[in-house]
Image (cartoon, rainbow, N blue to C red):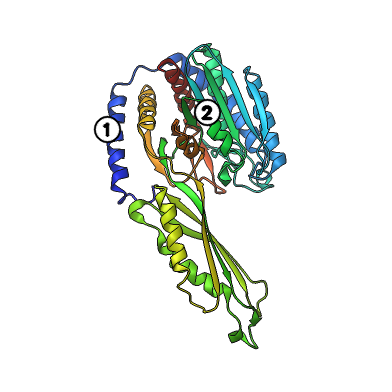
Amino acid sequence: MRNSTSGGRAFTTFSLLAACLLSAAAAAAPKNEGLYQRAVEAKPELITLLGRLVSIDSGTGSEKGLDAVGAIVTDELKKLGMRVELSSAAPAAGHNLVATLDGKGKAKILLMAHMDTVFADGTAAARPFRIQGDRAYGPGVMDDKGGIVTAIYALKLLQQMKFTDFARITLMVNTNEETFSKGTRSLIDTLSKQHDVVLSMEPGRAADGLVVWRKGAGDLLIEVKGKSAHAGVAPESGRNAAMEAAHQMLQMAALGDSAKLTTVNFTVFNSGDRLNTIPNAATVRGDIRVREMAEFDRVEKDMARLADKKLIADTEVKTSVTRGMPPMPVNPGTEALARRAQAIYGELGLTLTMEGSGGAGDANYSSAAGTASLDGFGIVGGNIHTENEYAELNSIAPRLYLLTRMLVDVSTNK
């Protein structure tokens, strides 16, 4: 969380949730020794599969890499007897994967993961998968290839247990989560409404936690039109779009609201291509994160208002806010799933932290569709989206146990 001293309502909810979770942990059932042993024994194979996936560049937009990852995942799931369907992720690259397994019970559970990373082609060769101590390193090792392999091996453990007391378990693997799932949102919405529960395979939090709320995310845009002029001969005859854009960026950067956990950050600035010319155009792009949908509207109106407060006369300023992912709020459905997860982890003598995140994910969409959703079931790790991204190998067996037991618990307690 970005600001732990504000957002009182959110943290009151956290306090109540934490009390429930501690109570659940105290009443934890005995560990399922057979399942835990299977999870421990699956670890070497899981790491091998993780290495294969991490060794493929699959940045959002890298169709060849995305399809290569999808092919490996498809093969693994078909070995489990799952029906696998691939569909175009247009306008994004690659093909979304949906695998289904039918059982004999009542519960319908959706698992969600994503195969795309934030890394460019060539990264896997430059920083190949490696194990150092108790950590694995490589592009996307925790976000979210660790989530994919955890889901696959939990399904394998269910098969070993001959557990079929569910109506359907579906695994959806997205190709473009890192860009707001623009090619997958309708699929997520449809699948979410067809299932009772969504468990999202985003990385486990560094403190060994799950995610009970996420901020919504959107794009900010400032566009400025000015007038070109020679920077040395007649600069006064021009209207410097870059200077005006910088002014607008600085005044609009103050539109965040720490009390509501709203953040506004401008991150990309483009203007001009010659040092001796006053630029006639500039664009500034940025990122907005909100806990409340109304904050999108408030920031949009305030940006339009501030656009009239110009530094340079006779420039034209336009602003916009593009809403990406809606917020994922804490709700009774999420709290109920969190209590179940905490009780299960308590069987191992471990405690899950329950956290919020400024990062948006596909659980934002499933939650908005009205389906109880809980996030962060992947491998624990850190340094997400950096050259030092890592996965904690010692978290594999406990996390595999957690997910498998959650599938059993949700199925048998429908």
Name, please, the residue furthest toward the bottom: 233
Mark 1 or mark 2, earlier in chain? 1
Tell whether label 2 touches label 1 (CB within 8 Å): no
Q: Is residue 244 above or below residue 92?
A: below
Q: Quadrant of the C terminus?
A: top left
Q: Which residue is mark 2?
A: 111
Q: How many marks?
A: 2
Q: Which residue is mark 1?
A: 19
In the image, what residue type sits under mark 2? Leu
In the image, what residue type sits under mark 1? Ala
Could one spot residue 147 in this view of the protein?
no
Q: Please name the residue shown 42% across and 62% down the image.
A: 302
Bin the neighbour count of mark 2 within 10 Å (Cα to Cα): few under 14, some 14-19, many 20 and up.
many
Q: Nearer the viewer, mark 1 or mark 2?
A: 2
Whole-percent x, y for residue 409 in the image:
42, 19
**Marks 1 and 2, Cα distance to the nearest angstrom?**
27 Å
- 125 lies left or right of 389: right
Bin the neighbour count of mark 1 within 10 Å (Cα to Cα): few under 14, some 14-19, many 20 and up.
few
SS of the residue under disc 1? helix
Pick the front one: 84 or 159:
84
Could one spot residue 345 in this view of the protein?
yes
